[in-house]
Structures are given as structure tokens and as C-alpha cells.
Amino acid sequence: VRGAGFATKGWTDDAHRRSKENKLDKAFPTFMSQEDLNCSLVGVCDLFDVNADMALNASQNDVRPGRKSNGSATRYRHYSELLAQDDIDAVIIATPDHWHSRITIDAAKAGKHVYCEKGLTRTFQQALDVYDTIKETGMILQLGHQNRQVEANDKAKQIIDQGLLGPINLVELTTNRNSSWGAWVWNIHKDGNNKTIDWDMFQEPSPNKIPFGEEALKRFFRWRCWYDYGTGLSGDLFSHDYDALNQILGMGIPKYASSSGGIYFYKDGRDVPDVWHVTLEYPDRDMTVLYSATLSSNNSRGNRIMGHDATMMMGGQSNVGSVGGFIVTADSESTQYRERLKNGVINSKYPIFSYSPGSKQIDGVTSATSQYFANKGLLYTYREGKRVDPTHLHIKDWLDSIRSGTQPKCNVDVAFQEAVTCAMATESYLTGRRVEWDPVKRRLI
């Protein structure tokens, strides 16, 4: 909820201290400069008492000048109680993935607009159910891909639409992480126990149940490591890169998806892979998209959109010196640039175009995980030279759409494309076969 303007006192105090100690740490001034979205946090529901208390704290932490004083939000033990409140217009769903579809559907049927974190759903059938419900109810849904607000993606789309890359036949997307946190080995809270955690409710929608104990604590706090609660790399990281590419190219759901990988490094009982490769095939566009991920190497490879005439490099290897930038380099065998390459006007070793938002500014991004998110444009972006939190922009986009009756940038149509594509890749890994999308019968073959 920090993107909506609500932060705990602990976070604001710590961020303020860090900004004083290090002028490069801009988290606090970025938060303080956020536009007031004219909304109130009036209800919270969490299955862990500590998290619920933090949300209550955030609901009444008046730190920004001129902000209206907030009363404390009300805590609800079950989300259905929250949805029954007439003074609640919209909900933010930031639960583990296995709860997304049920809460989204119930919220829409209760007349509440929905901001749902990615991935949209855990299964293919859930994606169909969510899509149909949102369409039937007319509620506004925004999927939490804040990269939709990253300026670099809009600039990349403009360049590609102008034909600077020529025909695009191959795209490479990558994820590189090399830390326990980046592999979802998150801390088990010292106050986590059977009195502070509603474990039975947490696992209620999951296909497999276990009694509360040490294993349950691991699964509660590190839920991304198991298919019972999420889809690992698919819904967490692949979904971001796919959605950003879909924003740029508008390629939609692939005809075929195949994937492979394994658990090669983290032998901790998880059942989701830590190395994973996905191939998406778009025969109608003469294009293949490759996704390659490892959680045991931090050697950032960036993303590449490869055209006959030029290649666009985005992310960690674009060498443009800032978050969310990219470069375009002409191909030595380009048809479009042949004469200019021949007479030396263009050199294929150097960029013909580069985009570097905020290049004159230096930001204090230190940890490897933070740098990963920064390179993807997920921590912040720039608008008119000003650093802005893309999550804040994404929530603003959602609220503006609710008020105006328009559709947000990551609406249910593009959210459905993400959910189906991720489901195809996940299904391929779990079954060991290539998965085909049948758009007429809306089924996976």
C-alpha cells in the first residue's frame, strides 16, 4: 500500500534516516513527493497478526505535509467480512497467488474494483474464471505489473513501431539472481506461530494440505517455492518480462509454449525450478520469444529484441548508465542501413540510438536484488526528469480509471494474456510437453 501513499512509521523513520546518512538514497524523498491520491485505507485483512498490525499502523501514519489525518483502519479476520463493507470501494490483493482468483472474483461480485498483484492466477482455469467475472461485473481490474508505467517501455515501442529494428524474429528475455532472498528463501518471522498465523485458512485453496509445524512455517513465509501456492519463476519474474514485452510488441498469447529446467542449486525441499527456460512461439508473427532464468548466477544478461536491421538491448547490459534504459545497434548485414553502413555514417559497433532516463542522476541502489529490480525498471522510473515510483503511478492509473470509467494500462484483457501465457509455460514444465493455445475454444491442448 506504500504506492497508494500509506507507509508504516517504521519504514518512514528508517527511510528518512537513510536519506540523511546517504544523499544517494532517494526512497524517502521519492515517497514524500508522491501525489496524494485522495483515498483512505479503511480496512485490512491478513492471516498473520504482525502484518495486519503493520497495515493498521500504515493506515494512520501521517508523515507527508498537508495530508489529512487518518483514523485507524479496521482489521477483518476474513476477507468476506471486508468485502461486505459499504464504505469500501476497491481492494488491493497482495496475497500469495493461490488466493488471487477467489478473492478477485468475490470482490468483483461484491461491487469492488480490484488491484491484484501478479501473477494473476495460479492455474489456467482460474484465469478464465477471473476474466469472465470481471467482464460480467464491469469492475475495473489492474494487474500489478508496474512496468506498464516505465517510460523506457513506451519509448521502445515508439522506436519499434517506426520500423528502426526491421522485421523481428527473435527476442531473448533473462533473469539472473544469486542470493537466498532472490530465490525466495525469506526470513521466518520470530513471532510466527500457530497463534499468530491462521494456517488452515492460508492453505485452504491449495491442492495439498499439511498440519501446522516447522514445514508449514517454511511454506507460509517462503510460499513462492511451492506450486501449491504459486508458480515460482513463472508468475513472479517471467510474468514481468513477458508483460513488458507485450507492452512493447503487443504480441499477446503465443500459439505454443514449451519449458524445461530443474532444481539444481536450492536443495531445500522446494518443487519449483531454480533454473528455467521457456520458448514461446508466434508463427503468425514469424517470431520466437526465449526466456532464460537462473537463481544461482548474478551475471546480468539483459533483454534483447533482435531485428533484421537492428537490435535493442534493454536492462543490465544496455550500458546506458541508468535504470530502465536501452540502446539500439544496427546489424552489420542490415538492409535498411546498408548504404549508411557502407559509407561509414553508421558503425554497427556503436549505438544508433540510446535512451537513458535520469542519466544525469546517480541513485543509491546497492543490493544485488535491488539492482536487479532497478535494471528492470521496477523500483522507479522517470517522468520529466523526476524520479517516480512506478507502483505509485500504477495505483494512480487504476484509481483514475475507476473515477473516469476508463480502462487502466494493465486491464483485464492484457492481464488475461499474461495469465494464460504463464499457465502455458508452467503446464509445459509440469507435464514435459509442448502446450498449445486454442483461442476459439479457450483451452490448452
Image (spheres, rainbow, N blue to C red):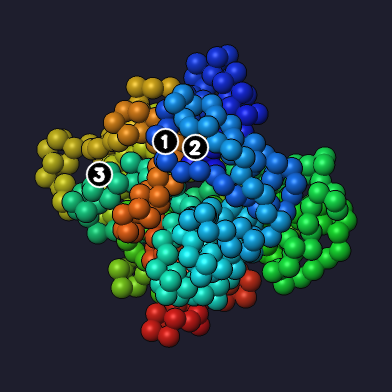
**Given contact means CB atoms under 8 Å apart, are the residues at marks 2 and 3 in contact?**
no
Q: Counting residues from the N terminus, which is met first, the one under dot 2 or under dot 1?
A: 2
Q: Count numbered badges in the picture.
A: 3
Q: Position of residue 163 (x, y in %)?
A: 19, 53
Gap in Å between the C-alphas at discs 1 and 3? 44 Å
Q: Name the residue under label 1.
A: 36
**Which residue is located at x 56 percent, y 21 percent?**
16
**Image position of 279 (left or right of 261):** left
Q: Name the residue under label 2.
A: 5
- Crowd band around label 3 with a 10 angstrom C-alpha radius: few (<14), some (14–19), many (20+): many
**Which residue is located at x 44 percent, y 47 percent?**
395
Secondary structure found at label 1: loop
Q: Could you tell me if residue 171 is visible in this image?
A: no
- Crowd band around label 2 with a 10 angstrom C-alpha radius: few (<14), some (14–19), many (20+): many
State which quarter of the image contains the N terminus: top right
Q: Mark 3 points at which residue?
A: 330
Q: In which quarter of the image is residue 149?
A: top left
**Image position of 147 (left or right of 348):** right
| Residue type, label 2 | Gly
Q: Where is residue 336 in the image (x, y as percent from the top left)?
A: 15, 51
**Given contact means CB atoms under 8 Å apart, are the residues at marks 2 and 1 in contact?**
yes
